């Protein structure tokens, strides 16, 4: 019942308000839920305080870019529907390079550990999703 109602509301938003409205609502909500939910999930697993602190740090950093990720995925879908496969391929290639370089710099050289990996992945996600949004709009 509830999932059907939410699905209908999302369909109405997409139909009448467009993907910008959907991304504006779901992005911040997703970030908030993942930050709030991560702590509860991590506490239910038997972890050391160091691992818990690192995992929560990763979740917070990755959640910070989730609003743009929702917009980017929507734009990627639009590009693929328009039969533009070049832009998504380039975006994924560039994101992969940025993620690898970022991991090397932040994790191996600067020794930031899990937070460095999260930062590198977030930067790669921002780049790819920024390319998608820029191409569509």
Image (tube, rainbow, N blue to C red):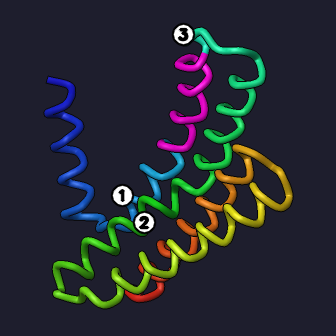
In the image, residue 95 lies at what x, y percent? 51, 74
Q: Nearer the viewer, mark 1 or mark 3?
A: 3
Q: Position of residue 49 (x, y in %)?
A: 76, 17
Q: Quadrant of the N terminus?
A: top left
**How far, Cα to Cα, is label 1 from label 3?**
32 Å
Tag 2–tag 1 contact (CB < 8 Å): no
For numbered disc 2, what is the local secondary structure? helix
Residue located at (32% from left, 74% from top): 76
Which element carries disc 1, helix, strand or loop?
A: helix
C-alpha gap between disc 2 and disc 1 = 8 Å
Q: Which tag, 1 or 3, sits closer to the chain's start?
A: 1
Q: Which residue is mark 2?
A: 71
Query: Hey, which quadrant is residue 53 in on the image?
Result: top right
Q: What residue does disc 1 label?
A: 22
- Of the two numbered discs 2 and 3 on the same chain, state the one appearing first in sequence: 3
Please give the name of the residue rendered at 51% of the width and 63% of the height, measured from the top-left corner: 68
Q: Residue at x 66, y 62 (%)?
A: 120
Query: Farthest residue toward the right?
Result: 110
Q: Which residues are magenta?
A: 30-42
State whether residue 96 is above or below residue 103: below
- Label 3 element class: helix
Cα distance, mark 2 to mark 3? 31 Å
Residue density around tag 2, few if under 14, some if 14–19, many if 20 or more, within 10 Å: many
Foreground label between 2 and 3? 3
Task: Name the side, left or right, on which 38 lies relative to 17.
Answer: right
Q: x and y percent of residue 98 in the render?
A: 60, 74
Q: Which mark is residue 44?
A: 3
Does the segment drawn in magenta span residue 78? no
Q: Is residue 74 left or right of residue 33?
A: left
Q: Which quarter of the image is occupied by the C terminus?
A: bottom left
């Amino acid at each position: 019942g509830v999932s059907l109602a939410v699905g209908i509301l999302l369909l109405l938003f997409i139909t009448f308000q467009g993907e910008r409205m959907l991304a504006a609502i779901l992005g911040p909500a997703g970030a908030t839920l993942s930050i709030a939910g991560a702590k509860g999930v991590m506490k239910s697993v038997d972890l050391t305080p160091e691992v818990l602190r690192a995992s929560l740090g990763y979740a917070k950093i990755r959640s910070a870019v989730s609003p743009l990720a929702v917009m980017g995925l929507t734009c990627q879908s639009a590009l693929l529907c328009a039969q533009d496969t070049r832009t998504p391929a380039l975006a994924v290639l560039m994101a992969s390079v940025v993620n690898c370089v970022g991991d090397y710099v932040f994790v191996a050289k600067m020794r930031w550990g899990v937070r460095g990996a999260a930062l590198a992945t977030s930067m790669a996600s921002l780049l790819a999703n920024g390319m998608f949004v820029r191409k569509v709009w």
